[in-house]
Amino acid sequence: MTMQACGFGGLLLSGSHHAQLHNLGTAPLIGGLASSVTCLHMMTEPMGGVAMSSGIYQIENQVNGKRYIGSSVNIESRWSVHLALLRHGKHDNQHLQRAFDKYGESAFAFTILEDVEEFSQLIECEQHYLDTSSPEYNIAPTAGSSIGVRHNEETRRKMSEAKCGERNPFFGKHHSAELLRKLHEGRRGRHHSDESKQKMSAATSGEQHHYYGKHLSEEHKRKISKALKARWTQGSERHHMYGTHLSEEIRQKISDALKGKQANAETRKRMREAQKGKRNNFYGKRHSVATRQKISASLKAYWAQKRKERGDVP
């Protein structure tokens, strides 16, 4: 495809696009260079039968040769958006934004790499260019998605703070009982396949785990412990069952589901190993005299009730 230069920052358009642009008039100059924003704005107007181009485009830093490759059903409009965001320092691609701030807009050239008439083929075509060209400014290696993007600690902190408290769109709201029932019924009976389970496990194992190599501070551990104690203490408002009661039907279903279930030998072995030595949450601890007395009284009452139910009471 023959390419011709037109507009600011080395804007390159195909011959047909350039001819249509020329017929619309000449853009005013900014710093001795024609403004591509004006040119593109004129091209996006529904006048003179100008057709919008869809396909693959490239933004190249002419100083160091680094590139950004993307796709759009309306390339001209997309370039206008890129340039507006870059000029205002609000582009979501930090690599491209920092380079734009450092080298200036005159250092960047916009090029239409390929016209793609079938919109359904855009992502596939873009992926081909990403795989073969490895553009340096593209953050995500997968076309049309954010897969592979890793935010740094500072960015994650800001994203978290932006959704905390009253800034969360669901702050102060609650799902209705009817919606909760529908959500529950929609998930009922769904099970992950063994293959899916293996993939999920592999995706969060070892170095893939989000907490790999990290350690909680003593203060953080104390806060977690305090929160969990409040959550699992009967009578606490933070307890997950606070204010709710299981119906007799639900209790019977739970009982029936657990009857006759036994862990296999391998599972029992793993459970024992997981509770040995320092891994046991009671390692190095001792019950107080008062606690031992409570446990003893509770067990005596339990077995007395069992004997009564069996008719073994003397």
Image (tube, rainbow, N blue to C red):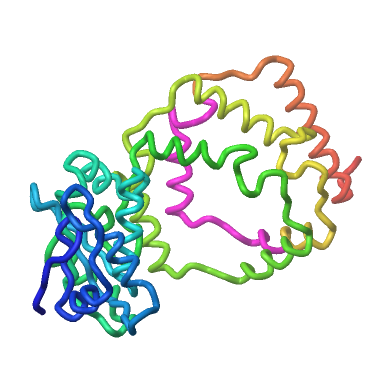
Position of residue 149 measured from the top left corner of the image (x, y, whole percent) = 31, 51
Residue at the extreme top of the image, as rendered: 289
| Residue at figure coordinates x 28%, y 84% from the top left | 117
Position of residue 51 in the picture relative to residue 67 (left or right): right
In the rendered image, which quarter contains the N terminus?
bottom left
| Residue at figure coordinates x 61%, y 71% from the top left | 189
Q: How many marks?
A: 0
Nearer-the-camera pick, 36 or 158:
36
* Figure quadrant of residue 222: top right
| Residue at figure coordinates x 62%, y 30% from the top left | 227
Nearer-the-camera pick, 298 or 55:
55
The reply to whether the magenta stretch includes residue 266 is: yes
* Figure quadrant of residue 164: top right
In the rendered image, which quarter contains the C terminus?
top right
Q: Is residue 246 above or below residue 154?
A: below
Position of residue 294 in the picture relative to residue 210 (left or right): right
* Figure quadrant of residue 94: top left
Position of residue 276 measured from the top left corner of the image (x, y, whole percent) = 44, 33
Q: Is residue 9 above or below residue 302?
A: below
Nearer-the-camera pick, 160 or 91:
91
| Residue at figure coordinates x 85%, y 42% from the top left | 305
Position of residue 231 measured from the top left corner of the image (x, y, whole percent) = 68, 35
Residue at the extreme right of the image, as rendered: 314
Q: Magenta region: which residues?
A: 256-282
Nearer-the-camera pick, 260 or 278:
278
The reply to whether the magenta stretch includes residue 100 is: no
